[in-house]
């Protein structure tokens, strides 16, 4: 009975009854996951230090980059108005009056919605308008079944969802002192959806591309590193560090592969490269918002704070 009331029965004296090492020595050796966390934490601290001067401007930069593809698209429609009309009428068999209306509504919606996103006014309506543009263009131009187009625009939509989350972070709909559970839940779900959708561009990069964009061993290495970063973004483990890594990878890829400024004005792929360049800029903008806001409550990073 004395032994039961003492420390021996509860193994509180760091004595292992099975003859193995005590609990203190077992805990002294960090697991590989703990070592990874320690190293990535150091990298995150270093990134926070060097990014401190630009950190206040990250939301504005991210929002601008997200909508830059829509602004470029609106400008392209205006400058290539007759070519757009010919394509929609002759190849898509859309009536003449409807083609004018289709292009005009797209230009107006993209311009107004993009400006609203940049100035942080009525972000909900602006995002709905831009998502509507993505869907209507996919139907109007017959790209709904183009897998590369589909994956890229899923990523663009992910960036737009990050815009919504960013606007809800800054907004406070309920009076002070009252709980805002619904608002937090909504932001949490949209941050999760935005994180998941943002990485679809990388899936398109892995499985898509033409012969000119295949880098051999270099491309395989980029895919492996990017895949790990994408998984970390989805689960929310060191999401900020992973998002920064993806920003670097996509930016380098964008400059090397989609260098439309080096192509002749009559090059048949110039417009495609230009379109891809600005779309990747939009996804980079979404990743910058992720860096600024964090992954949200549905993430490993947030769960670590709780437990």
Image (cartoon, grey):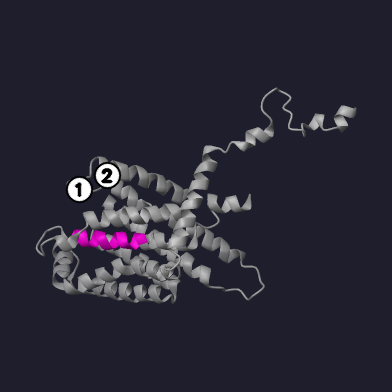
Where does residue 140 sit, x and y in percent of width and height?
A: 25, 63
Residue at screen point 49% across, 59% down: 294
Q: Is residue 153 visible?
A: yes
Q: Quadrant of residue 2?
A: top right
Q: CA distance from mark 2 to mark 1?
A: 13 Å
Q: Residues within 10 Å of mark 1 (few under 14, many from 20)?
A: few
Direction from residue 176 to residue 10 in the image, left or right: right
Point out residue 259 in the picture as x, y percentages from the top left corner: 20, 59
**Percent position (x, y) of residue 108?**
30, 76
Is the residue 130 above or below the residue 22 in the image? below
Q: Split into 4 quadrants, where in the image is the N terminus?
A: top right
Earlier residue among tags 2 and 1:
1
SS class of the residue under badge 1? loop
Is residue 92 in sight in this rendering?
A: no
Q: What residue did someone put label 2 on?
A: 219
Q: Horizontally, is 64 left or right of 267 in the view?
A: right
Residues in magenta? 271-284
What secondary structure predominates along the stretch shown in magenta?
A: helix
230 vs 93, nearest the viewer: 230
Q: Position of residue 150 (x, y in %)?
A: 31, 54
**Front one among 200 and 97:** 200
Q: Are marks 2 and 1 in contact (CB under 8 Å)?
A: no
Question: Residue at the spot x=28%, y=55% of the render?
Answer: 252
- Give me the residue at 21% from left, 70% from top: 76
- Mark 2 vs mark 1: in front: 2
Towards the viewer: 185 or 3: 3
Q: Give above or below for 216 relative to 194.
A: above
**Residue 142 highlighted magenta (yes or no):** no
**Hey, which quadrant is residue 94 in on the image?**
bottom left
Crowd band around label 2 with a 10 angstrom C-alpha radius: few (<14), some (14–19), many (20+): some
Residue tagged 1: 210
């Amino acid at each position: 009975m004395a032994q039961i009331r003492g420390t021996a029965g509860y193994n509180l004296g760091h004595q292992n009854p099975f003859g193995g090492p005590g609990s203190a020595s077992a805990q002294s050796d960090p697991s590989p996951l703990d070592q990874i966390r320690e190293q990535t934490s150091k990298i995150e601290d270093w990134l926070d230090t060097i990014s401190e001067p630009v950190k206040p401007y990250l939301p504005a930069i991210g929002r601008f980059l997200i909508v830059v593809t829509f602004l470029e698209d609106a400008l392209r429609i205006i400058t290539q108005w007759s070519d757009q009309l010919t394509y929609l009428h002759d190849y898509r068999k859309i009536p003449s009056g409807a083609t004018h209306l289709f292009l005009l509504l797209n230009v107006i919606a993209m311009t107004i919605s993009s400006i609203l996103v940049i100035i942080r006014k009525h972000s909900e309506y602006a995002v709905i308008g831009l998502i509507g543009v993505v869907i209507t263009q996919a139907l109007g131009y017959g790209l709904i079944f183009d897998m590369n187009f589909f994956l890229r625009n899923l990523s663009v939509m992910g960036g737009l969802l990050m815009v919504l989350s960013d606007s809800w972070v800054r907004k406070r709909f309920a009076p002070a002192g009252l709980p805002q559970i619904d608002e937090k839940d909504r932001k949490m779900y949209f941050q999760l959806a935005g994180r998941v959708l943002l990485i679809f561009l990388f899936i398109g990069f892995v499985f898509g591309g033409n012969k000119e964009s295949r880098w051999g061993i270099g491309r395989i290495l980029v895919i492996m590193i990017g895949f790990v970063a994408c998984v970390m973004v989805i689960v929310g483990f060191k999401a900020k560090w992973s998002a920064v890594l993806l920003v670097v990878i996509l930016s380098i890829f964008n400059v090397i592969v989609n260098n439309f400024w080096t192509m002749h004005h009559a090059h048949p792929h110039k417009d495609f490269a230009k379109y891809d360049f600005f779309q990747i800029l939009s996804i980079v903008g979404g990743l910058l918002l992720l860096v600024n806001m964090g992954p949200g409550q549905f993430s490993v990073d947030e769960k670590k704070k709780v437990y």
